[in-house]
Amino acid sequence: EGDFAVTSSYLLAGRGFRSSPLSHDEAQEFFGMPVIGLDLVDPRYYHLDTALCVLDAEADEIMYYPDAFSPGSRAVLRRLFPDALLAREADAAAFGLNSVSDGRHVLLPQAATGLLDPLRDRGFEPVPMDLGELLKGGGSVKCCTQELRA
């Protein structure tokens, strides 16, 4: 799921460095949900899950790093998610968006300290995790998961 993120309304789909936009049509047909293609433009954010995290799928609440996306994709994100939490560069670079949320608890790398208070202010409970060795390989919390959907 590195280049797909699911909310109750949309299937967000990254494209650019490691994913083909051809997968978007197939995903839309299979899941029967609108697929929103988002262009990644910064190679440090090579998958969607390094630049965007769904905080509460049912409420369509996300956080993302704007500079990882093309101008058009930023405009789409602003329109669809006007109240999104916007991450700063230091937190994005620490893989703070490669996080996992159950709608209340947000497991994130401990180095993404700038996200802690904004998450608390929105009613989430951040759970910082030490993933130092995994970070060296270019991933974080989300890379340790495999979500199953019915």
Image: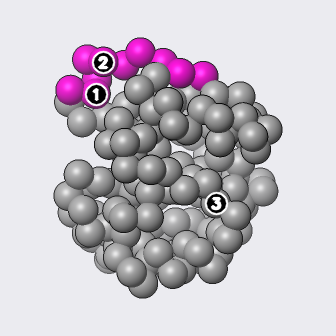
Residue kind at label 3, given as amino acid type: Ala
- The nearer-to-camera label among 3 and 1 is 3
CA gap between label 2 and label 1 equals: 5 Å
89 left or right, relative to 128? left
In the rendered image, residue 41, in percent from the top left (x then y), is placed at: 26, 69
Q: What's the mark number on residue 59?
A: none
Question: Which residue shows up at 52% across the image and 66% down it?
Answer: 12
Q: Residues within 10 Å of mark 1 (few under 14, many from 20)?
A: some
> In the rendered image, which quarter is residue 3 located in?
bottom left
User: Is 149 in front, or is 62?
Assistant: 62
SS under mark 3: loop
Q: Amino acid at mark 2?
A: Gly
**Number of labelled discs?**
3
Q: Which mark is residue 84?
A: 3
Residue of label 1: 135
Give the image location of residue 24, x and y in percent: 42, 73
Mark 3: give few (<14), some (14-19) or many (20+) Cα within 10 Å.
some
Per the rendered image, the range of residues in magenta is 127-136
The picture places residue 138, in percent across and down from the top left corner, at 24, 36
Pointer 2 residue: 132
State if disc 1 and disc 2 touch (CB < 8 Å).
yes
Please check the rendered image and state whether residue 130 is part of the magenta-colored stretch, yes or no: yes
